[in-house]
Amino acid sequence: PLQAGIVGLPNVGKSTLFNAVSNSAKAQASNYRFCTIDPNVGLVDVPDERLDKLAELVKPNKVVPTQIEIVDIAGLVRGASRGEGLGNKFLGNIREVDAIIHVIRCFEDENILRDEGEINPVGDKEIIDTELQLKDLESVEKKIQKIEKQARVGGDAKAKAEFEVLKRCQEWLLQGKNVRELGLAKEELPAIADLFLLSIKPVLYVANVDEGSMHTGNKYSEILQKVADAEGAQMIILNNSIEAQITEMEDPDDKAMFFEEYGMKEAGLNRLIRAAYKLLTLRTYFTAGVQEVRAWTIQEGWKAPQAAGVIHTDFEKGFIKAEVIGYNDYVKYGSEAACREAGRLRIEGKEYVVADGDVMHFRFNV
Ligand code: GDP
């Protein structure tokens, strides 16, 4: 599964959040799985109301959600890019994730230490950004040095084009900006693909606010929201301590009371997991049989055979066709048979681009 890494300065609430994610998964109904792969890596189910709805209609023996991996990347500090506080190790961990969940402290609490003085969400965000950018600059400049000659002399067209892209990245990074905002074209990406840049990874900001502001946000999260908007990035407001408390409750009635008391419809973590899933530009299709109703993860734009390959490589190799019912139709008519009768079951071929929410049934040769 794809991975999202939790980053942020010390004492902003990263571990609290990671623990909440792991506990919540453990405490959920039996079909909600979480397993700790190692102390800092957890595999977590992605909550999806559509899956619940399909399960209600089909009443299968088993319901299987799709999952993502959440990694707690502790220990980033100012100077990490120079190796400060094991910085290189943590930056290396970021290199391996597909997306970044950046937790930023938007709560005041004098008992909880801050190295950086007054609460300053934008400043904190910039400290982390800067470390990632410096590391990226190092990678970009190394490669520039390597291909500079090739690009200048002789005039190897490919090297020249790559050199251009690298130079633009360099200038951008020197301005203190993240490569993700540079808007590189698809054709330009191969020039930097081998560098596994950090600041190009999609990011979700989590404003960790105090209890009183969890529905409204506060002055800190407001400033941060403006910055996120300017970057075209998503931000969600959470109170990590509350989330951690919720996950410690085992009795569903206690939980319901707690939700009511705090005016919550669901755990904020569900929002977090869904947002992280979206950040990874993932799409979901479903299979719905009496044995099992299951959600499967694909990327945007995948065609039917590739999507079938997620279930089994044989499905992809031997793909003949797919029977497809749109999610809304499935719910409207209530069953596969009813959809078939109403003419809402389509037969699609190899070129069909799977839509988010499709309920699929594959036909294949073995
Ligand atoms: P990390 O260093 O970023 O992993 O931070 P931790 O999750 O260990 O949190 C540091 C301290 O802040 C702990 O004592 C937490 O209980 C506390 N903390 C975390 N989130 C909140 C919050 O939303 N409000 C308050 N007041 N304290 C919090």
Image: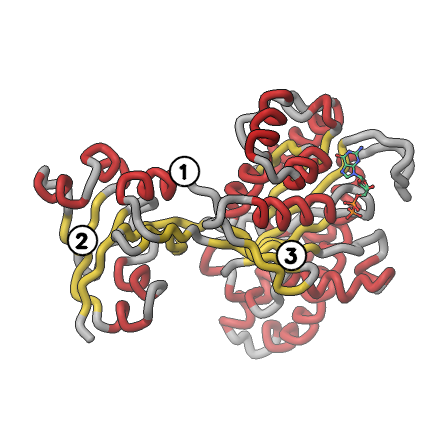
Camera sees residue 175: no
Image coordinates of residue 138 in percent, x first then y, are: 74, 64
Q: Secondary structure at mark 3?
A: strand
Residue lying at 67% horizontally and 26% vertically, measured from the top left:
214
Q: Nearer the viewer, residue 204 or 291?
A: 291
Camera sees residue 121: yes
* Residue bearing mark 1: 49
* Residue bearing mark 2: 323
* Label 3: few (<14), some (14–19) or many (≥20) C-alpha neighbours in 10 Å: many
Disc 3 versus disc 2: distance between alpha carbons?
37 Å
Q: Is mark 2 within 8 Å of ligand 1?
A: no
Which of the numbered marks, if any, corresponds to residue 224?
A: none
Which of the numbered marks, if any, corresponds to residue 71?
A: 3
Image coordinates of residue 285 in percent, x first then y, are: 33, 50
Disc 1 versus disc 3: distance between alpha carbons?
25 Å
Three-letter code, disc 2: Glu
Which of the image's four quarters has the C terminus?
A: bottom left
Question: Do tag 2 and tag 1 residues touch (Cβ < 8 Å)?
Answer: no
Q: Secondary structure at mark 2?
A: strand
Three-letter code, disc 3: Val
Residue lying at 61% horizontally and 72% vertically, measured from the top left:
152
Image coordinates of residue 211 in percent, x first then y, are: 73, 26
Q: Quadrant of residue 255?
A: top right
Residue lying at 30% horizontally and 49% vertically, measured from the top left:
60
Three-letter code, disc 1: Glu
